[in-house]
Image (cartoon, helix red, strand yellow):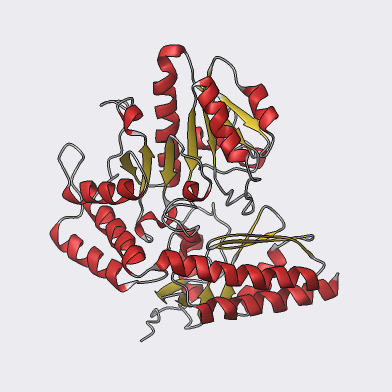
Amino acid sequence: MTQVAQVGSQAIIDVFDQYVIPNYRRQPIALVHGEGSRVWDADGRSYLDLFPGWGCNILGYSPPRLVRAIQEQAAQLIHVPNTWYIEQQGRFAEFLCTRGFGKAFFCNSGAEANEAAIKLARLHGGAAGRYRVITFENGFHGRTFGALTATAQPKYHEGLGPMMAGFRYARMNDLEGVRGLIDQETAAIMIEPVQGEGGVRIPDAGFLQGLRALCDEHGLLLIFDEVQTGMGRTGTWFGYQQSGVQPDVITLAKGLAGGVACGAMICRSEIAGDLRPGMHASTFGGNSLAMAAGLAVGQTIEEEGILQHVQDLSAQARAHLLQWQQELPIIREIRVRGMMIGIDLTIPSAPAVAKCMERGVLLNATNDTVVRLLPALNVSEADLMEGLEIIKEALEQMAGDV
């Protein structure tokens, strides 16, 4: 049964206009209820959401097991500080690390997870005077000052300088360029195994392996920002598992707890002790509610065979999109890794996203020309194909207008 707000979207927007800082470019829609890959606004209109929660709602809206876990945990215990042992935190850490590696630190967001990774890199390299981190153009690592400086996109730095010292920027797929940036003060190399906000950009074959070799040669930590690629998004638990590369550190957030605020840094057990007591903390990180939610998400993905579903549906989507590319000259490139889908156009992508929203399909425009989809991992074949057909119609119209 669809629940509709007692007030319409405009009434909600009016309250925002009066009391909320306008630091977001919001669509004139107030979403109030969701089920699966469908969401309803305060006026009762439904949408097929192929970018649910900015990728955080990794199992869509209101997945039953997650809802039950949150309800049961909220009735028992929501939050206690990390000065005590928290059963749910230990259990979720065990779940993640036994499907990956090492030991976990929990926080609330991707930016916080990346801050923890940057601190760990500096602490690990401190005795040798190493503090610099190499990151990559078109990457995105968060909005806090460390993570923001790590983000090699000048548009996000505008008006906020001076940025933090200790970061150098390289071009993806240019190993010799990376090598030229390494010096005696370099502590780590940090990269997304698939650049999300940068347009679903997938590194060339061999590049991540080359970074691993450079880190081994110079004694550096290799950090994979898996805020978007983690928790099954690419069809394996973590994106690194498709690269043949073992990083020293990964960072996680977005879909980690299915829409509940949650982030994590996982590192090799041998270096975990560098993040010693007093050097980093998170008051709400690892709270009982988020940990119960994360465990419910992980168990759902595993027990319902969702990783295989992602792989199968990804292959279908790729085949459709590659066919479009042959038919529509405005499509420059198709990039697909699991349920990360980027359609790179020769023209701006925002109008395509707007046209789809008018038709009841929610997407994202990123990196100026890329239509980006991050569907729920358990999106049905019927829903995904329905959404793709509407996207194709919008692109066909745009191609005819060029």
Using the image, determine if residue 30 lies above or below residue 276.
below
Q: Residue furthest bottom?
A: 1
Where's the C terminus, which quadrant? bottom right
Residue name at image x 32 percent, y 33 percent: 269
Where's the N terminus, which quadrant? bottom left
Foreground: 29 or 16? 29
Using the image, determine if residue 221 lies above or below residue 311.
above
Q: In the visual, does 289 lie left or right of 322?
A: left
Q: In the visual, does 350 lie left or right of 142?
A: right
Q: In the visual, does 121 lie left or right of 51?
A: left
What is the tally of numbered marks visible in this picture?
A: 0
Asked whether the viewer can see residue 301, the reply is yes
Using the image, determine if residue 237 lies above or below residue 182.
below
Q: Residue furthest right?
A: 402
Residue 384 % position (x, y) = 55, 75
Residue 26 % position (x, y) = 56, 62
Foreground: 76 or 32? 76
Asked whether the viewer can see residue 360, the reply is no
Residue 152 % position (x, y) = 62, 37
Residue 19 % position (x, y) = 45, 57
Residue name at image x 60 percent, y 70 percent: 317
